[in-house]
Amino acid sequence: MTLFTWIDLVYLLAAIGFILALKGLSSPKFARQGNLLGAGAALLAIAMTFSIPSVRHAGSHLVLMVVAMVIGTAVAVPAARMVKMTAMPQMVAIFNGVGGGAAALVSMTAFLVLTSTRGGVAGSPAVYEIIEVVLGVLIGSVSFSGSAIAFAKLQELMPGRPVTYPGQQVINGIVGVAILGLVVTVAVTANVAVLVILAVLALVLGVIFVLPIGGADVPVLISLLNSFTGLAVAASGFTLHNNLLIIAGTLVGASGTLLTRMMSKAMGRSLINILFSAFGSVITATGGADGTGADARPVKTGTAEDLGVLMAYARKVVIIPGYGLAVAQAQHAARELADLLMARGVEVFYAIHPVAGRMPGHMNVLLAEANVPYDELKEMDEANPELADADVALVVGANDTVNPAAQNTPGSPIYGMPIIHADLAKNIIFLKRSMRPGFAGIDNELLFDPKTTMLFGDAKDSLTKLVAAVKAA
Amino acid sequence: MSIGSVGIIELLTIFVLAIFVGNEVVSKVPSILHTPLMSGSNAIHGIILVGTMAILGEAQGTAQVVLGFFAVLLATLNVVGGFVVTDRMLEMFKAKPSDRRSKAPTEGPDEGGSTP
């Protein structure tokens, strides 16, 4: 067998590893092993790639290659290890974006090779080869810049609410048409300069595609961009005639698309609605347009002492955690309060919205980190029927996931998203830093409900005060 | 520059089959694993590193070398960071039952149930 046969066989092995890795990641029992298997498969494939003659004998390029890999590893490992659990979604967005960028660069460089002059003859790639390149550059670039904007939104470097501006649809249309025109031009002329312009426009497309998407929907968007990167990688695989890239990229593209659909479903929205709902709904998205400005109306605020007594003598208390709890690192304080109440015979559980935090399943990860016993966590569908006879719903740093507008205000950006029915409880306590709207950037009627009492402040401080109050009660 | 020697039809065949496999393997993922699965598949497309290596290996002229270098760098970030960050997420899931009492439901059937 030739060396290349061996390489192809090892790549096949790696491809099988990736398939099994995805299978493992889909089951709670084998998720971690699945991920490790994927890492092992990647390592194997990369090691084998060093044996390709053109890589092995690349001389100074080989040195550059190793340097780039060392730098990349030296940056990625600490970043991935030290990132706070709350910032995990942004991290995934970055790693996805750079992958898309890499795929775009591969296709771009391959195009330079395909069109370069060899032995006095200018290269003339076949149309299908150009199409493969164009797809890789286009999709990879969109994924790169789109992920960057998604990162900025999650990191709150820019407003999370949908960004809309006059003439948005016109601009989108122009960019779209220009890209189509450039694709045709490249296919006909095989001109490098045109491809570069196309890449730049694709970067612009990524930005304007993501801008109008609301902060709360960004996780679904990241999942979509993830599958885009997969497809870009597959396109590069076509260009390089590499089975492994095609299989791995397509696996991610296909499973990512399905995952994106499942995520939207968990939020009770269609993907189309998430991607394009901001257009034409500018008024509802900016909130308060119905004449009920957030700070115009009075809200009821209470003292920790009163609220502590209320909970201490309740029969059933439901804690509804949100992102605010996570940022304040208040998991432990929440658990102390829960334990204290349970010691007094109060029934306590946590109601977890599927998209509480920043991503589906994010809150489960955060509470697991704080060692909250698993059996005290209830998923939304299980928790909602119990809220009607709860004496207190304690909303800690959550907002959008308990916003009744999702159920009763058609036209609201979150309309259709299932919520945790805090509004059914006899008393509602909101621990919030301010009246600021949630991540989706819309007001919450529940804050003004007569049953609602606000306790402003950092979630951790407020919980600590409540603990003291319950102890004193 | 190609690493293998297969024709476009073979490549298309692999592509189409991989679509079906990709859909099949994740069809039963419970919602609690959505985030780790996304992160894990994000790491898998980092295998573009293999392609970037081939590109840089054969690069000629400054432009190709520079593009190739950055491609390798970005792909390394993707593949290394992706797997490490996913492992960290899943580590949390494992730490869960180490708490007293409920020893039984280790990582078993999650409340929340699978998405049909």
Image: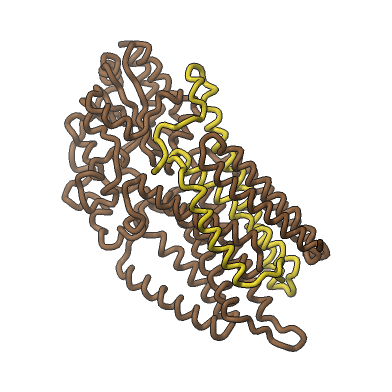
Chain colours: A brown, B yellow
Relative image position of residue B12 (x, y in whole percent) = 57, 68
Relative image position of residue B35 (x, y in whole percent) = 48, 43
Q: Which residue occupies 37% across, 18% down?
A: A467
**Is residue A148 in view from this perspective?**
no
Relative image position of residue A185 (x, y in whole percent) = 51, 83
**Is residue B31 in view from this perspective?**
yes
Q: Quadrant of residue A461?
A: top left
Q: Which residue occupies 72% across, 60% down?
A: A8
Where B52 falls versus B82 (above or below)? Answer: below
Viewer-closest of A7 and A275: A7
Is the N terminus of chain B in the top left, top right, bottom left or bottom right quadrant? bottom right
Viewer-closest of A201 and A136: A136
Q: Quadrant of residue A473?
A: top left
Q: Which residue occupies 32% across, 34% down?
A: A381
Viewer-closest of A157 and A160: A160
Is the C terminus of chain B in the top left, top right, bottom left or bottom right quadrant? top left
Relative image position of residue A169 (x, y in whole percent) = 32, 69
